[in-house]
Amino acid sequence: MNFLHKINKKIQKSAEMISEIIEIDVEIMDSELNRIAGTGVLKTKIGINMADESHIYKKILFDGKSRVIFNPRENDECSDCSQLKFCNEKFEVSVPIIVKKKIVGVIGLICFTENQKIHFIKNQESFITFLKQFSVYISNKVLDYLEEVNNENLVNFYSIQHKTENFLFISPPMKVIYNRILKISKTLSNVLLTGETGTGKEIIAKAIHLNSDYSNNSFVSINCGAIPENLFESELFGYIKGAFTGANPNGRIGKIQQAHNGTLFLDEIADMPLNMQVKLLRVLQEKKITPIGSNFEIDINVRIIAATNKNLEKMVFEGKFREDLFYRLNVVPLEIPPLRIRKDDIEILSQYFIKKYCDLFKKKSGISKDALEILSKYNWPGNVRELENAIEFALNVVGEDEIIRIENLPEKITKFNHSVSSLDLSKKNFVYLEEYYNLSTKEKKEIAKKFGISLATFYRMIQKEKHIK
Ligand SMILES: Nc1ncnc2c1ncn2[C@@H]1O[C@H](COP(=O)(O)OP(=O)(O)OP(=O)(O)O)[C@@H](O)[C@H]1O
Ligand SMILES: [Mg+2]
C-alpha cells in the first residue's frame, strides 16, 4: 500500500511553500500515479489518477532515477510518449521518493513558460538539491507515519496491492519477475513456471491471473502429483450422467471446463502421466474437450499456467515428458529465483509471517536483529516455505509477548555453517541471470555483490548465459 495519501495535507503544504520560493509549479504523485499534491495549474487534478499523462514518471517509478528534461518534445526519453503531440511543457525535473529502498512516488517540477525555464536553468543546481531534500523530507514523514502505527503497516507497505495482498518482495530479482508478471498477465499465452520448491510458484500463478483481464473468472488449480492415474481423465474432462459405474449420477464438470475463460493452473506438471499428456495436448491444439461418455465437443478458452520444480527439458530428453506438450506449455517461461539469491526479501517476508502467525496464535511478537541476521545467512533450500515454517516454529516456542531470538529458531538454521558461502554458483542458478540484463548498473552491482563477484564477471556471466540459451 502507498502511504503518501495518509500524509497528503503535510505534503500539499510543503509543495505550496516550495513552489512559492522557486516560483515554479510542483506536483507529487504516488506509485500508482495518483496526484497527491500540486500547485498552480497542477492543483486542479489532486486525487486523480494521471497514469495516462505520466510517461516520464513511469520510467522513474521503474528505475528510481531522477530526470531533467530540457525540451520535452525533442527529448529521446519522450519519443515513445503517447501524449507527445499535446505536450505543452517547456522543462521538467523529476525525482523519485524512496522509502526503505522502495520507490513510493515522484516529485515533478514543471515549467510551462520560457521565463520559468530560464529562471530554473539559472538556479539549476540549488533547485535540484532542494527537490532532492524535499524528497527525503517526504520519505521521512512516511517513515514517521509507518513507525507510529507499528509493523503491521510495514507489511502492508511492502504488499503488492494488485489484488494479491500477500505477495511480498523488495529484491531486484523479484522486481524483474514482477514486471514480467504484469506483462504476461495481459496476454493469454501459456506460461511455464519453474523454480525450486517453495519459491512461490503458486502465488505467482495467482498473481498472473489476478492481474489479467479475466481475473473475475475462475482460477482452477490441479495438483498433477496428487491425482491417481485412473481418475485423471474424469478430473480434467468431466463426465456425463451414467458415464461409468461408481460415477456421480448427475455427471460432473471437469476442471478444464470450470476454468473456461479463466486460468487452469497445472501444478507439478512433471507428474502428469504420459497418456494424459497426449490428451492435454489435444485440448491445447483444438481448444475443445469431450467429457467422458459424451458425443459432443465443448469449446474451451483457457490460459494454462503450468509449474514444476523438475527439469522438464531433461525429462523430455529422457522420454518422460512429451516434447510437443513441453513446447505448447513453455510459450512464456518464467524462472523464480531461490530465496538465497534474493536475501533482501527475508526481512519483509519474516515480518509478514510473524504477523500471520501472531494473528493465528493470538500472540504479540517481533524478531530481534540477531535472529534476522541468522535468517539472512542461511541458504534456504526450502525457500519461502521453509522460512514460513521456521517463523511458525519460533512463534510456537517464544513466550507470550516475547520477541523471537536466535535460540527460538530451528536448530538446522542456527547450526548452519555460516562461514561457507551460502551462494550456489552452479550453472542452474544462472539460468535467470539473463533477466538481470535490463537492470540499472547500480542494481547489477548490488546483485554482483550478493554473488560475491565483480561487476565485470557478472556481465560476462550474463553474456555467456545468453549464448547458451
Ligand atoms: N513472495 C511471497 N510473499 C508471500 N508469501 C510467499 C511468497 N512466496 C512464497 N510465499 C509463501 O510460501 C509458501 C510456498 O509458496 P508456493 O506454494 O507458492 O511455492 P511453490 O513454488 O509452489 O512450491 P512447490 O514447488 O513446493 O509447490 C506459500 O505459503 C506461499 O504463500
Ligand atoms: Mg506449488
Image (cartoon, helix red, strand yellow):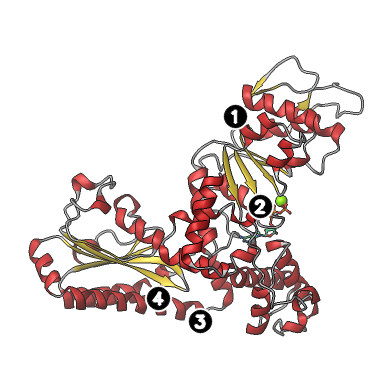
Does mark 4's beta carbon lie closer than 8 Å to ligand 1?
no
Left or right: where 177 falls relative to 135: right
Query: Where residue 243 sits: x, y (%)?
Result: 84, 21
Give the residue type at disc 4.
Ser
Q: What residue is pinned by disc 1?
A: 301
Q: CA distance from mark 1 to mark 4?
A: 46 Å
The crowding category of the residue bearing disc 1, from other C-alpha atoms within 10 Å (few below 14, some 14 to 19, many at least 20), is: some
The crowding category of the residue bearing disc 4, from other C-alpha atoms within 10 Å (few below 14, some 14 to 19, many at least 20), is: many
Does mark 2's beta carbon lie closer than 8 Å to ligand 1?
yes
Q: What residue is pinned by disc 3?
A: 148
Outermost residue toward the right? 245
Residue 465 vs residue 165, the one in the foreground:
465
Does mark 3's beta carbon lie closer than 8 Å to ligand 1?
no
Q: Secondary structure at mark 3?
A: helix
Q: What residue is pinned by disc 2?
A: 195
Mark earlier in primary sequence (2, 3):
3
Give the residue type at disc 1.
Asn
Mark earlier in primary sequence (1, 4):
4
Outermost residue toward the left? 115
Q: What residue is pinned by disc 4?
A: 139
Q: CA distance from mark 2 to mark 3?
A: 38 Å
At 62% from the left and 24% from the top, the residue drawn is 285
Mark earlier in primary sequence (2, 1):
2
